[in-house]
Image: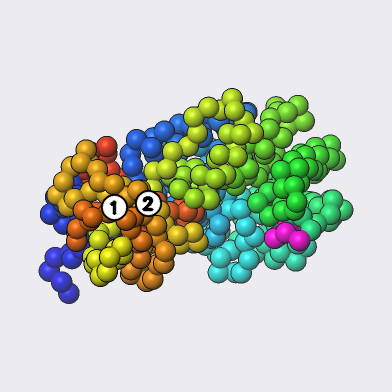
Amino acid sequence: MCSKQIAVNKGGVEISSSLLSGVSLPAAVVHEAALAHNLVWMQRFADAHGAQLAPHGKTTMTPALFQRQLQAGAWGITLATAPQCRAAFAKGVTRLLMANQLVGQANMAIIASLVEQGASFYCVVDSQENVRQLGRFFAERGLTLSVLIEVGVTGGRCGCRTQQQILSLAETIADAPALLLAGLEGYEGVVHGDNPEAGIRAYAQYLVEVAVALEAAGRFAEDKPIVTASGSAWYDVIAEAFDGAPLQGSFTPVLRPGCYVVHDHGLYREAQTAVLNRRPDLHQGLEPALEVFAQVQSLPEPGLAIVALGKRDIGHDQLPIALRRYREAGTPAQRLSVAGWEVTHIMDQHTFVRLSDDAHDVKIGDIVAFGASHPCLTFDKWRQLLLVDDALNVKEHMATCF
């Protein structure tokens, strides 16, 4: 056994807290100011629409960010799997919304343990068989499980396809002593077509109508049943549908965006532009807070730089974007140009950058800040991220859970 703990995580402080001189690169970085802005912005948005916020934790799986979201006013944290819920609970999250079906006895056992420890837990159901399985499992343990019926769409992902299926499932839940029907859940991100906005508005309205019908039939076990939807692209449309007379005062509307917390430089930047076009009253939107810093390692031929950054370090459903450049051991004020730089290819540990014709000052060791699309796919490549201030000094190490 080692006599002392050895640091094994990549992207950590080695010499000093300066990102430009003391950190092993590549490193995943969260900018403190942009993070603070996003936390306040989305919470204010939810509050203004009479909705609760349960950010999707799968985006970051970073307990330090969960706590910041809760401190900013979040109602709870959304997760996708039983182990994710256990990890969040272990770090102090007590209200867990699992926006997924709970299947398999081992996963049920994880959740049963959390409920026994005092977790307020919700999962979704969309089939008679799953309801029967859950009912038996939790009844045998003398526990009660709160469930939400998932409302799906034809050609989509999970969820009941017809209102009759929903009504029938509600009856089965009512007959299961260990289950409580706490509300409805949906996800608009699987609604596609030639006019997705119209389709999503129709889906959101359908979700509201089904909730009102079930409430009128006395099917819900809670005084203010939950109605929840919303990813990170169409949250404004869902919020508008929830912010109306049918739900307000009688239901608990819950929005579940996750990527907002650090935003991005790709998919969700485009989505946010669309949000602001639909809602010009929102003015300033979200700010990208997540970047990956890496160093130029080779200049093998004119016009080409190879950067020590790869698929193991950054999300790549869209190619990364070079944002800024610095000299190693320089200062944040001494920015160097990346105008005209284009990432053309990415491998496991190498990124190919086509340089502009006038990029004659590039040196081995230059530090480049890269933006990425879809932050989930960058977070899941790191066991720690670095929170930095405007001077690019590391303020905090933020550990991730798988």
- Residue 340 disc label: 2
- Position of residue 354 measured from the top left corner of the image (x, y, whole percent): 36, 61
Labels in figure, total: 2
The Cα–Cα distance between marks 2 and 1, rounded to whole angstroms, is 9 Å
Asked if the stretch drawn in magenta spans residue 157, the answer is: yes
User: What residue sits 19% from the left and 58% below the top?
Assistant: 363
- Position of residue 374 measured from the top left corner of the image (x, y, whole percent): 49, 54
- The image quadrant where one finds the N terminus is bottom left
Q: Main SS of the magenta segment?
A: loop
In terms of image quadrants, where is residue 38? top left
Dot 1, how many residues are within 10 Å of its Cα: few (below 14), some (14-19), or many (20+)? few
- Residue 358 disc label: 1
First of labels 2, 1 by sequence position: 2
Please report the bounds of the magenta region as a residue range: 155-160
Q: Are marks 2 and 1 in contact (CB under 8 Å)?
A: yes
Which amino acid lies under the numbered mark 1 shown in the image of this protein? Asp
